[in-house]
Every structure is written in structure tokens, then in C-alpha cells.
Image (tube, helix red, strand yellow):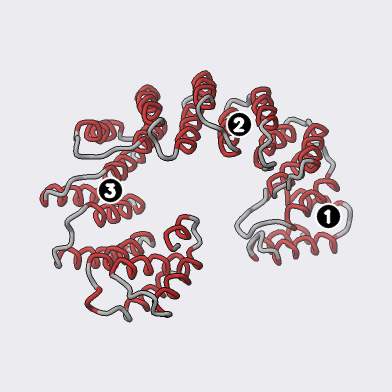
Amino acid sequence: MINLLRDYRRYKHALEVSYWMTDKRFFSPEPFDVGVRIHLIFKDKGLEEVEKYLNSILQQFKGFQIYSALLNCYTSEKSVEKAEAIMQKIRDRGLARAPLCYNFMMNMYYQTGNWGKMDNMMNEMKGKGIIFDQFTLMIRLSAYAAAGDSDGMDKIAKMLESDKRIILNWNAYAITAEKYLNVGQAEKALAMLTKVEGMIATSMNKHHAVGLLLKLYAQAGKKEELHRVWDLFKQNLRMYNKGYISMMNSLMKFDDIDGVEQIFEEWESQGLSYDFRVPNFLIGAYCRNGLLRKAEALIDRGLSKGGVPSVITWCHLASGYIHEDQVSKAIEALNKAISICPPKFIPSKETLRTCVEYWENQGNVEKAEEFVRSLEVEGVFSAVFCDKLRCFINK
């Protein structure tokens, strides 16, 4: 139950199950359970609560599971000094015998730009006879890519291919391809994508692999490969909403509205659950190109089929109305977006500013102030940004 809830990022509920497990005395916790609980506390309540909990852990439990879980927390928070102190404890106790803790440290050094220390970690692993795994090499590859060092990337790619002790999956090749694309090495990226294709048949997550393949071929500018992969895999796989979303999103990289319309029609013919993320690609394209009637018709069509427009749907429509100088309709659409706005979603600031300008021109400062207040109450924008909007209104 805990692992399943973690997979769905339901950390609070997973933590409740963890405490229920021990507080009701159904099970005595093992070190692994304590390590998992540390991770859940970190995700749900933060690092300070983890450190409080650490004081309640019996000394007999403080082995690799606990220290590695704590190291994961510190490296995730980029707390370099605390992470290095815990890593030293792991070394001193002779627990640094596998790549896991080194990978945590390397990822933190990559995120903080301490790339020299990444090499120190790899040299230490070599000295102890610890075999690099694919995560070790992927982290170092990412750092080389961030530095634009294609020679360094080639060195890591060669290690991936030559060391038979490293167990690779398609995702390692996909990441390598993406990093090569980021440094402008398209031919090397395409060679990696060929390897990804060859591994999909035996993959446990074929749909995700196909989606990533479509994205990367689009990033490489290979539209013909995009269609080839789509046609190839849909013969053997039943494509669901996410697959159609991946294909439509990839075609939008080429501004191929006709192609997106064809995939949309194909999706509708499958009778899948009506997910507005699929038509949103077309709604956005129509609004950007002055085809508001088509966008409105598509929204009405989705509503008639039981679909529920998302925040993005209404923001697309608001943007389209603004470009056509139909600001009153834009405000109506934006209010619908705000009414269902999730906490972390941020609508276009340009759209909001245009709405406020509209009220200012109408001489209705009170209405503009009411609108800004609703943004603040709903948590759409910070108080600082809302204050700036008020200054803009009252200037």
C-alpha cells in the first residue's frame, strides 16, 4: 500500500499508512520501513520534521537504510555541507559499498554546478571497486551536456556501450539522445533513438517509451520519423489519451495544424474518455491564428460529449479573444479559468494585464480592483504581483 501511494505521489496518505502500521502494533518496523518513513516525512512535511524524527530513531536502526534515506533528503534540498557530513558517516561505518549514495551526491553536485566533485566521486568509486550503474553515468552525461562538452558525452556513451556489467534500459538511451540533441549532435542522437526503438518491444512501459520517442524525433526535426513511429507502434499497441497527446504535441513543433486535426479525428473515432488535454492543442492553435469560431465550436463539441474544459482551455480562449480585441469575452473566459485554477497554475500575465487595461479604459477601477483581489484570494499570483497590478491600475 505504501509503495503504491508513493508511486502516485500521495505522500501524506502513505505516511498515514506507515504510522498506522506501527502505532496499531500490527507490525514491528524494520530498518527499511524507517528509511521509507524518512522519505515520506521529507516529502510531506519537509527537512526540519525529518531531523526531529531522526532523534526518535533507536541507535540500532541507524545503519545504511537510515543514513541513505537521510542523504537523499539533504541532497534533494541541496544542503551540501549536511550531505557531505552524512556521506562521511556512511564512509566511516564502511557502508559505502554500492552506487546509490554516490549517485545522490553526484546528482547534488550536478544540480549545484560542482562538477569537479562529481569526478572525485567517480574516482572514489573506482578506487573501491564499485561498479558504475546507468544512473551514475547518466548524471555525469547530463553535466557534460550542460557544459556543452560533446567529447565528454562521447566518453560516457562509450562506457555505457562497452561495460557489460552495466544493465541498461531504453530510458538510458533516450536520455543520451536528448542530451545529444541539446548540444546539436543530431546524428549521434538519432543513433541512440534507433536503439530505443529496438528495446521497446521488451519494455514494461511501452506507452511511455513511445511517447518519449515521438517527442525526441520532433525535437530532432524528423517529421517523417514521427509519422513512421506512430504508424508502426499503433499497429501493435492500443493508444490511449496520453499517446494521442504525445503525437499531437510533437506535430505542433512543426506547426502542422492539418496533421494535428487528422490525429484528433482519429482520437475521436476511438471513443476514449473525453480528455480536454487532447483538443487543447487545436484550441490553442486556432486561437493563435485568429480562428476563434473553430475554437469555440471545438469547445462546444467537447462539452456535448461530456468533456470538462481545463484552465488551459479557457486561457487559450481568453488569449484568442484579446488578439481579436474582444476583451469583455476574454475576461469572461479568464474568470472561468480562475474559478477552477489549481494552486500552482499561472495564467499568462500578458492576458491579465490586458484585462486590467480594459477596465481602466472603461473607467471601472472598482471592477479592476475586484478582479485583482480575486487573483490574490485564489492564490493565482503572489501579493507582490497583485500590488504591481494595483499600481498599474491606479497610476
Q: Are marks 1 and 2 in contact (CB under 8 Å)?
A: no
Q: State whether residue 79 is above or below residue 8.
A: below
Dot 2 alpha-carbon crowd within 10 angstroms: few under 14, some 14 to 19, many 20 or more = many
* SS at mark 2 in the image: helix
Quadrant in the picture for the N terminus? bottom left
Residue furthest out toward the top: 224
Q: Quadrant of residue 391?
A: bottom right
User: Amino acid type of disc 1?
Assistant: Glu
How far, Cα to Cα, is label 1 from label 2? Answer: 39 Å
How many labels, in total? 3
The residue indicated by pointer 2 is 248
Q: Is residue 53 left or right of residue 62?
A: right
User: Amino acid type of disc 2?
Assistant: Met
Of the two numbered discs 3 and 2 in the rendering, the one whose residue sits closer to the viewer: 2
Q: State whether residue 351 is above or below residue 206.
A: below
Q: State whether residue 189 is above or below residue 2.
A: above
Counting residues from the N terminus, which is met first, the one under dot 1 or under dot 3? Answer: 3
The residue indicated by pointer 3 is 115
User: Amino acid type of disc 3?
Assistant: Trp
Q: Position of residue 248 (x, y in %)?
A: 61, 31
